[in-house]
Image (cartoon, helix red, strand yellow):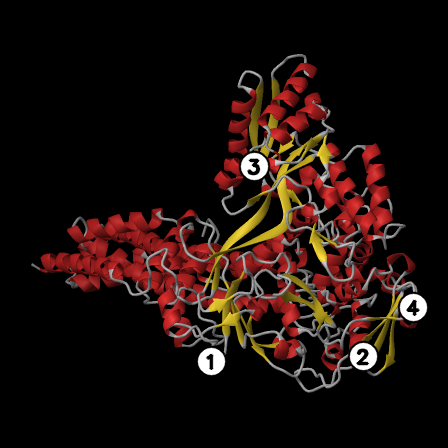
Amino acid sequence: MGKYVAQRLIAAAFAFIIIVALIFFVLFSMPGNIVSDPTIKETVRKAIEEKYHLNEPLPVQFAYFIRNYMNLDFGTSLFVRPGVAVFDVFKERIGVTIQLNLFSALFTLPVGMFFGITMALKKDSIYDIIASSLVVFFISVPGFVMAAALQYFLAYKLGWFPIVLAPEVKLNWTKFHSMILPIFALSFGSIASIARLLRAELAEALTSEYMLLAKAKGLTFRQRVVRHALRNACVPLASTFLYLFIGVLSSSLVIENIFGVPGLSKVLVSSINAKDHQLTLGITYFYVLIGLLMSIAADLSYGIVDPRIRMGGRKDE
Amino acid sequence: MKRNRLNLLVITILIMTLFLTACGKGTRDEGEPAVSDEGLEETGADVSDEPAVLRMTASETVSTYNPHNAASAQEYEQLNWVNGLLYQRIYDPEQQRSDFVPDMAEGEPIQMDEEGKVWQIKVQKGLQFADGTPIDAHSFEYSFKMLFDPKLANRNYGVMYILENADQYYTGQCEWEEVGIKVIDDYTLEITYEDVYIPNNAREVKETFAFVGCGLVHKETYEACFNEDRTENDYGSSLEKFVASGAYKPVKLIPGQYMEYEKWEGGSPLAKTTFNVDTIQVTVVTDQETALQMYENGEIDIVVANREEYDEYPDLYYSYTPDLYGIFINAKSETNPVLRDKNFRYAIFWGLDRETIVGATYRTNLPCAYHYGFTTTVPDPEDPDNKVINYRESEYAASIKLDGHPLENNCYNPDLALEYFQKAYENNGNQKIEVEMQYIEDNVTSKAWAEAIQEHFKNLFGEDRFQINLRAIPAALVYENLQRDNLNYEILAAGGIYPNIEYPWANSNWVSSGPDTYSTQYTVISEEAAQEWDDLYYKCTIGEYKHKPDERNWAAARMEEILYEEATFLPAYMRGNRYMIADHIEILMEDNVGDPFVEFALLQAIYHPRQQ
């Protein structure tokens, strides 16, 4: 197991370096830079380009970039937060993004599992039909439509929630109350996906022969479901959930815009538009890192959920 | 039985939700004012004794409060609230336009020599930063020195090159003592301009020092914000790294979400004399629908309301940006010779029904056939120090003709257009003229604008003789395609030009030689015309016309005439927005149209009691 984790981490490190280099060259190959605005005086343009090596050939800029990153110097934002270290900008915005996505995950998993389990247990009932229809609905409707609808009806029309995120620095009830709608908007799609997956897996498990054996051994229905069927049905769920979490993390831009959430996605888009490449690189690397670590976590989760799956074993073992 | 009860519960919840939604509290009918007129009358429409709070939205929080390197023009306004300046542009209700007034300066700049190269500015006594640090001439000198610092390479140094040896210091070629900024005594600054940039009058001096980059920085805090080698400085990046000196101080900043400012009266004297707002709350909202909902719920005081459903709303306010948009015709096209034919360009110019097409597509924009828009002003030659006159009403602008035809009726003349088209058609060997028109992909309005032009000219010139083929391009390519070195289009129905609306003769967009060459130049004129343009431009900005208002006004009109004859850009409209403003705010503009520089001057507005 340890060897397998080490192998995966080394592979992830290689992947990370390649992706980092690729992103660098793609970004810096784009036409223009932070001083492309033709109204900027030539003296100022030259001074800024020289200071940040923007007038150097791309390989030279890459060498500077690698040197700085080796020294854990992630550079300075040049436009979106001029003069502020990229890592500080990152720290400024990551909190609310993590909060939102964590709450979304905490809400998504139990609710999705509840519907998945109840739908499977009441398969082909009216409840199952209605819930399945809702699942299709929530998977089909894009997140931003759901966000706009929630905001319009529950915040604007009914006044149950604030229209935008409350301007509170710390997480308190006022802030949490205003986060409920974005959490809902982020969660509905994932809930539907989990419910559908779990329903299918659990329904199949419930009709398996080992369930018949368990019944013959005298286990109650609840024991059979919880100890045998559910555990097997959850094996694919573990990885799916982790990938859904990555998806939510990187696709919350529209939700952030609608609800005025000062998250990382918004600053990423601002930095791309402003050609503030240092900042873009810093944030992108975070997403890459999270993605790689999550994929390792997803692989490892198979072994935890189902001990029959051994990690790193040889084929002939 | 259980199943039936569950079904009943689900149905009941659905019905309740619909019922509650329909009866929801939060909304007035669309079209109903946020506060009724009757309500205002009942209160006597008094000026509020309560603290005046202005609640507005912005697309982002300020990137920094450091006036030296704030990069976005949208945030300059907020920087001017919190950083003291020697002069500031505010709205003058008597003149019904904005102008420069002393802020921390005591009175007007004093001309110290005959030619106007040296000026003195007195700093008011008794002013201080928000932490109590006194403000004097040395505070300004330090701020300017940091703005010009060669290691920092500050972005907002840009307008200061007109001071003596400023460029040399900024590029590390001379000492600070040689720069044209001197402290004469604790409350007097002496400014020396470069010979070629000697200002015409005190107003131009005030304008120089009203620029956001000239805002004060707090020395002690600024020094603490340097990195080790003094190449970076993050002053103003957070409230802890900033000390206010303007009329307001920021009291809350959540990056990306919210800013709050409170008025205080120790810094900028404008806090006492001019600004009526006590607290400003700025919420970051990028989604227009969200902003409208917040306005309807009474959570903000001003919102853009361009949509058709607000047409009948009472008390709408309009604001137009100086930039001009229209059609670019590639007069240097190597693939389609008809584009090089002036007759074709004139046909499009006179044939474009701006009122109809702009009105149908961009509902809140202002149709405009002029290269220098309706808000352009020039100094009154009779009184060049103070008064300005509308450029379009000036004698010289009124006399501009295109190929002998006066510019009337917003330049829509279908008969004349057909006449020119006939000539272009003949020059094309009586062959059908076919051109490609680019518009912005994934932009519904841009597509509608291009389609309206396509349809209009098909009907005007005849389907058998003229055809426009549409092609969508990514938004990022619009200005790249327009650049002088690319010209990668036949006709481009997107993009615009930013003219100089106070000094129209100083429009560098077309300068192709000398120190002010416009590097990317989005429109082109012929080489002969370019020579005449550059000659007039430099005569007006640094040459023999510089101090002659009448000659400059004449030159401005001649330069605009050159654009009509030669430029690849055909103006069609000025971009505008329509706003709703809460009823308890009474703005100073009599015609409900915002000033191009200070828009609605909401800090100066009159605040009546807010209706609950």
* Circle 2: element type: helix
Q: Is residue B307 visible?
A: yes
Q: What separation in Å lies between label 2 and label 3 (alpha carbons)?
A: 52 Å
Tags 1 and 2 touching, CB below 8 Å: no
* Badge 4 amino acid: Asp
Residue bearing mark 3: B354
Instruction: Name the residue nearer the viewer: B567 or B46.
Output: B46
* Looking at the image, residue B272 lies above or below residue B166: below
Instruction: Report the side of B400 relative to A229 (left or right).
Output: right
Q: Which disc number belongs to residue B137?
A: 2
* Badge 3 amino acid: Arg
Residue bearing mark 4: B113
Tags 2 and 3 touching, CB below 8 Å: no
Q: Residues within 10 Å of mark 3 (few under 14, many from 20)?
A: many
Residue A64: x and y in percent read 76, 58
Which of the chains bears the disc numbered 4? B
Same subunit, labels 3 and 1: the answer reads yes
The disc, 4 or 3, on the residue closer to the chain's N-terminal end is: 4
| Residue at horizontal 27 percent and vertical 59 percent from the top | A230
Which of the chains bears the disc numbered 3? B
* Looking at the image, residue B519 lies above or below residue B247: above
| Residue at horizontal 25 percent and vertical 58 percent from the top | B22
* Badge 1 amino acid: Glu
Q: What separation in Å lies between label 3 and label 1 (alpha carbons)?
A: 47 Å
